[in-house]
Amino acid sequence: MVVLAVSICSRLTEPCVQEFRIAEDFNSMAHQRNYLAHQGRVTGVLFSLMSEWVLSVGRDKYFQWHCSETGMRLGGFQCSAWCTALQYDSQSKHVFIGDYSGQITMLKLEDATYKSVTNFKGHSGSIQCLTWDPERKLLFSGSFDQIIVVWDIGGQKGTAYELQGHRGKVTALCYISVTQTLISGSEDGNLVFWDMTVSRKETPNWGENDSCQRCSRPFFWNFKAMLDKKTIGIRQHHCRRCGKAVCDRCSSNKSTIPMMGYEFDVRVCDECHSVITDDDRKSLATFHDARHPVVYMDLDETQQHLITVGTDRVIKVLHHTLESSM
C-alpha cells in the first residue's frame, strides 16, 4: 500500500510532497521519494491510481502533476491566486482547482500538456474544499462565505445550485455515492447531510432597479423620483425566491426554501411568501452536532466511517449514519 502525504516543513522555501510505503501490518512506513513541486505551502494532494499521477496545489499559485512511477514532473499551471483546494476526475482527466479569490479553474490534462476549459465564479469567499460525484458529474465547492455551490458539469448548461445550511466557514465536504448524500462540515461545529436525490432549483439573479419592484417606492439613490413624489428614499432588499429588488415593507416575511438550498429563514417578498406551502418548507437536510469545529473530513464508504478533524486537535471516527455517535 502506498500513501501520499504532505510534509510539514519549518522552512517554507522547501515545501514538498512525500511518498511513503506503509507496511501490511500498518505499524511502520518507509519513505520512498520527495516531489519538489512547490515554492509555497502545499494545500492539496491527490493520487490517481488510474493515471499514475500525483497532483498537488500550493500557496505558490501553482498546480503541478508528477508521474508516480518515475517521480518526474509532467506539467504545471499557474493560477491568479493561492491554490486552496483540488479535485480530479480520473475518467475524463479533468482537474478542478479552487483558489483564494473564490474562483474554480477547470483544466483538461494530457500526459504533459493541459487545455484550459473554463472558470467557475460563484463564491464571494475563498474556496476551502471540493468534492466530486463521478456518476452525475457534479462538483461541490465549499467556501469561507458559508455557502456550498453545486456545479452541474455533466449537464453542460452552466447550471449551479446553492446550499446554505451553515453559520460558519464551510471547511470540508464528502460525498456518499450510494445514497447520493453530500456531507458538509464547518467551523460552526455542525455536520449537515444533504439529500442530493431531489431536483433543486437555481437561486435567481438579484434584480437591479431604482424603485421597489412590488410597490414602486424609490430607493434612496433615486433622487429624481424622490423629488417628483416628494418622499424619502428607502433601502433596497432582495427576495431570495424571485430575486426582485424590494423594500423592507414589501419583504417583511421570512421562510426556509429547502428546494433552493435555503435551510435557514431568509427574506422573501410578500407575494412569494403567500404561495410558499408547508410542503415547500420541508427540510432536505439533516443536522448533527460534531462537537468540534471541523477543518477536515474523510469518508470510508466500505466501513461506513466518517473521520472528522477539528481545530481542537481531536480526530473523531463516526459511523456515517450517526446512529451510534450522535
Image (spheres, rainbow, N blue to C red):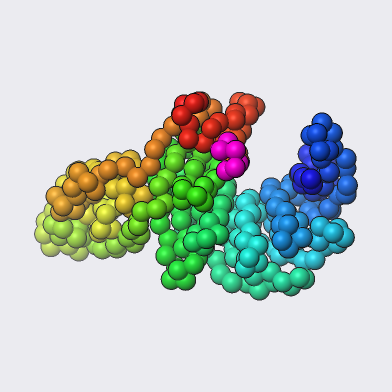
22 or 54, which lies in front?
Answer: 22
Left or right of 47: which side holds 137? left
Q: Residue 304 magenta-drawn?
A: yes
* Vertical relation: 35 (above or below) 9: below
Query: Which of the 4 image quarters holds residue 20?
Result: top right
Residue 87, position as x, y percentages in the image: 62, 56
Would you say residue 165 is visible in this rendering? Answer: yes
311 or 2, which lies in front?
Answer: 2
42 or 196, which lies in front?
Answer: 196
Residue 193, position as x, y percentages in the image: 44, 41
Q: Residue at x 29, y 63 (%)?
A: 208
294 or 131, which lies in front?
Answer: 131
Would you say residue 12 is visible in this rendering? Answer: no
Residue stretch in magenta: 300-305
| Main SS category, magenta section | loop
* Vertical relation: 157 (above or below) 187: below
Q: Residue 79 magenta-drawn?
A: no
Residue 121, position as x, y percentages in the image: 50, 61
Total residue callouts = 0
Left or right of 76: which side holds 195? left
Q: Residue at x 57, y 51 (%)?
A: 130
* Vertical relation: 118 (above or below) 55: below
Q: Residue at x 27, y 43 (%)?
A: 282
Q: Residue at x 46, y 51 (%)?
A: 180
Residue 229, position as x, y percentages in the image: 11, 59
State the quadrant of the N terminus.
top right
Left or right of 101: which side holds 239? left
